[in-house]
Image (cartoon, rainbow, N blue to C red):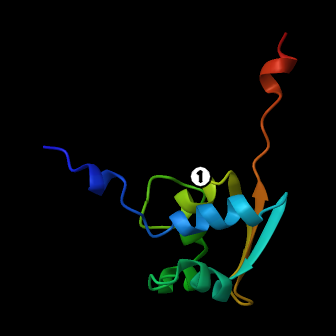
Amino acid sequence: MTNHYQSKRERKYDAVTRYMMSNGGSQVTLTFTQFDEILFPYSGLPKSARTTEDWWANDYKYPEKGAYGWLNAGYEVVRVNLEKEYVVFNKLMKSTFLLEKE
């Protein structure tokens, strides 16, 4: 039996998707503190996000990491600064490759 409520359940990084879709331009810079505020009432960024750039990989394979939050909003990480605690996202542009093949 399928639990419809569970399939619609909010995931931790859905708030990141909503934030970026409503506040984002071609580039978005967020401090780790801003990320923590966006994720409230969840526990904020995990320690690994503050200590390793791998956490910020643009990869859907690890849903416990935040990538689906920004990828679903149409953004990708282009720069992470662990020392100064900020991350820069660029809006993903639609490719014109298929149009150029004609």
Q: Which image quarter holds the N terminus?
A: top left
- Could you say which quadrant of the image residue 97 lies in? top right
**SS type, badge 1:** loop
Q: Which image quarter holds the C terminus?
A: top right
Q: Position of residue 68 (x, y in %)?
A: 53, 57
**Near-viewer residue (39 or 88):** 39
Classify 92 as above or below 100.
below
**Near-viewer residue (82 or 99):** 99
Q: Residue at x 42, y 64 (%)?
A: 11
Q: Residue at x 61, y 73 (%)?
A: 53
Classify 54 as above or below 26.
below
Q: Position of residue 10 (x, y in %)?
A: 41, 63
Q: Position of residue 46 (x, y in %)?
A: 48, 82
Classify 41 as above or below 95.
below
As drawn, the residue found furthest toward the top would be 102
The residue wearing badge 1 is 72
- Could you say which quadrant of the image residue 85 lies in? bottom right
Identity, as a three-letter code, of the amino acid under mark 1:
Asn
Residue 77 makes an appearance in the image: no
As drawn, the residue found furthest toward the left would be 1
Q: Is residue 97 left or right of residue 22?
A: right
Q: Residue at x 28, y 55 (%)?
A: 5
Q: Is residue 92 left or right of residue 64?
A: right
- Could you say which quadrant of the image residue 79 lies in? bottom right
Q: Residue at x 69, y 63 (%)?
A: 20
Q: Is residue 21 left or right of residue 91?
A: left
Q: Position of residue 63 (x, y in %)?
A: 43, 60
